[in-house]
Image (spheres, helix red, strand yellow):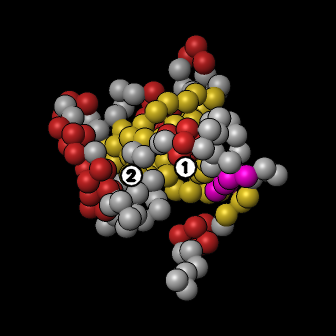
Amino acid sequence: MGWTSIATVSSRKDTETYPFVNIISFSDGPLGNGTGIPYMFLTPLDFTAQDVFKDDRATLMMTLAQGRYCESKNYDPMDPRCARVVFSGKIKEVKENNPEYPIAKSAIFGRHPWLAHMPKDHHFFFAKLKIGTIAVLDTFGGPKYVTLDDYLQPPKSDR
């Protein structure tokens, strides 16, 4: 899964302060060796970047409905067993002088190589979600909240 839905606070005059949702490509690094931090490649010409320039709060939601898992189990995308994770936090630009820049660049272009060829005059930039809260819904009974420490440093398996 290389894309996610992202919700921001709209900055457009016709929908100012309303929630706004968009689809973006994202990556946390190479498959099987990700950092857990969602990186993205944004342009000021798009809704998402325009919104986060005014209010950097955002929510990303990924779901197993984005692949074939839920369909193979006959789960409706709204079925809680069709797991989803919701990350809320703040979108922060990753500038070239930031030590994290090569990580963001490698994460994005490693999974989305075509993005390296976006028009220069569109002023794309790397950004990340500075995660504040994480909620997981994977069964009936409501969401579970995961601490950032547990998310970034999960327990080692004995297997």
- Write the start and end of the magenta stretch as one range: 134-139
Answer with the quarter of the image where residue 11 lies: top right
Viewer-nearest residue: 92 or 139: 139
Marks 1/2: CA distance?
Answer: 16 Å
Image mark for residue 49: none
Name the spot of residue 26 as percent of width and height, x first: 40, 46
* Image: 80 above or below 150: above
Residue 78 placement (x, y as % from top left)? 68, 36
* Residue extending furthest toward the top: 14
Specify the farthest residue to the bottom.
158
Instruction: Tell me the quarter of the picture where residue 74 sits.
Output: top right
| Residues at marks 1 and 2 touching, judged by CB atoms closer than 8 Å | no
The residue where tag 2 is placed is: 27
Q: Secondary structure at mark 2?
A: strand
Q: Name the residue: 38% across, 41% down.
A: 25
Magenta: predominant secondary structure element?
Answer: strand
Question: Label 1 belongs to which residue?
Answer: 90
Position of 47 relative to 106 (above/below): above
Q: Is disc 1 surrounded by few (<14), some (14 to 19) or many (20+) residues within 10 Å?
A: some
Give the left or right position of residue 156, taking residue 98 as reference: right
Residue at the spot x=64%, y=39% of the render?
Answer: 75
Secondary structure found at label 1: strand
Kindly identify the amino acid type of the residue bearing the numbered disc 1.
Answer: Lys
Q: Earlier in the sequence, mark 1 or mark 2?
A: 2
